[in-house]
Amino acid sequence: MRRKLEELDLIDDFLMNGIANNEKVKEKFFKKLLSVLLEQDIGKVTVTAQKMIPAIDTDYRGVRLDVEVSEIKNKNGIERVANVYDIEPHLRNDTDFPKSNRFRQAKIDSKYMKTGNNEFQNMPGLYVITITNFDIFREDYMLYTFKNSCEEVPDLKYEDGLKFIYFNTKGHKGGSKSIENLLRYIQNSTDNNVVDENTKELSGYVREVKSGEAFKEAFMTIGDHLDREREEGREEERKNTERERLRAEKERLRAEKEQKRAEKAEAEKEKAEAEKEKAEAEKKKAEAEIKALKEKLARLEAGMR
C-alpha cells in the first residue's frame, strides 16, 4: 500500500536527505538535531546530502554519505572545519555496522589530508552517527558511544577526535529525556510525538520541507522504492523482534534453571546442616547419659565403702 508523504518519518533517509537538500532549513535543522542528540553546542555548519566519496581506483569501493554536516570554527582568523558529523539513518539490520563504519570513517578522514600535508593536528573531529529503529547491541540503550582507548591504562586519554555513536530510537536506558523525546520523534514523526520545544522546532522544519513542491515531486517518483524499503525494514524489524523474543525466552529458561539449581543446593545445604545439628544433639545426649552413669556408679562404689 502506497504511503502518503505526510507519513514519512525522519528515520527514512529520503526525508532526511530532503531536509539536507532544502537550502532554507537544512543548517538550522541539523544544528538543532545534533545539539540535542550530542548534548553540546554546535557552531556554524554546512550540510551536504548524499555525497559520494570515490574509491582510489575501479578495483576498490567508494562510500556514500547520507548526510554530512561540517562544523566551521574560526581559528586565528581562518575558518576551518572543526568537526564532521556523518549522519546515517538505517531501517534494515543488514550489515556489520562496526566494520562498515570503520570503512566509512577511513574514507571520510582521507578527504581531509591532501598529498604532502603533514599537519595532522588540523584534522577535524569525526562523529560517525548511526540512527536505527532496532537495537544493534541488544542492551536497550538509547545510545552507544565508542571511542579509542588504552587497554592497559583505561583512564589514559587518546585524543584522536573520533567517535562512533549509535542511536536506538526504541531504547530506554542511558539518555536524557530530551534525547528520548527526539528519538521517538525520529522513529514516528507525527504531532503526537511533538512533546517539547526541541521536537516542536524540528517538526516545523519537517512540515516546511514536506510542503515543498520539489520534495513532493521527488516523493512521487521514488514512492515505490520507498514502499519496498519500508516493508523490508518492517520485515527485518519483525525478525529482530522474534529473535529478541527467543533470546528473552532462552534467558528466562536459563534463569529458571539456575534458580532451581540454587534452590536445590540451598535445600541440600539446609539438610546437611540439619543432619549435622541432629548428630551433635545425639552426641551431646550420649555424653550426658555416659556422664550420668559414671556419677551413679561412683555413688554406688562410695556406698559400698
Image (spheres, rainbow, N blue to C red):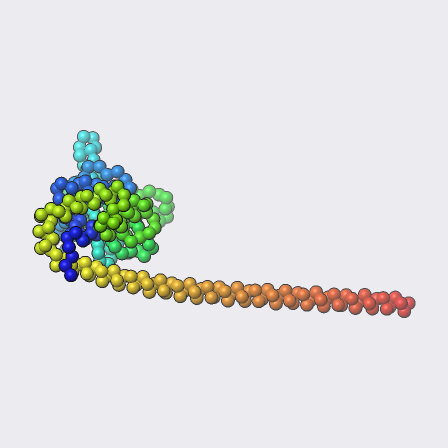
Whether residue 122 is visible to the viewer of this picture, yes or no, is: no
Residue in view at x 19 percent, y 61 percent: 232
Vertical order, 269 against 100 (above or below): below
Vertical order, 18 against 79 (above or below): below
Residues 45 and 99: in front is 45
Residues 177 and 270: in front is 177
Vertical order, 305 against 155 (above or below): below
Residue 164, image x, y percentages: 26, 48
Residue in view at x 22 percent, y 62 percent: 235
Residue in view at x 21 percent, y 48 percent: 87
Which image quarter is the N terminus in? bottom left
Residue 205, image x, y percentages: 18, 43
Residue in view at x 20 percent, y 47 percent: 86
Whether residue 273 is visible to the viewer of this picture, yes or no, is: yes
- Residue closest to the far top: 77
Q: Quadrant of residue 242?
A: bottom left
Residue 174, image x, y percentages: 34, 48
Residues 190 and 277: in front is 190
Query: What count of labels does the image hold?
Result: 0
Residues 63 and 186: in front is 186
Would residue 274 be found to the left or right of residue 67 on screen?
A: right
Residue 216, image x, y percentages: 10, 50
Which image quarter is the C terminus in? bottom right
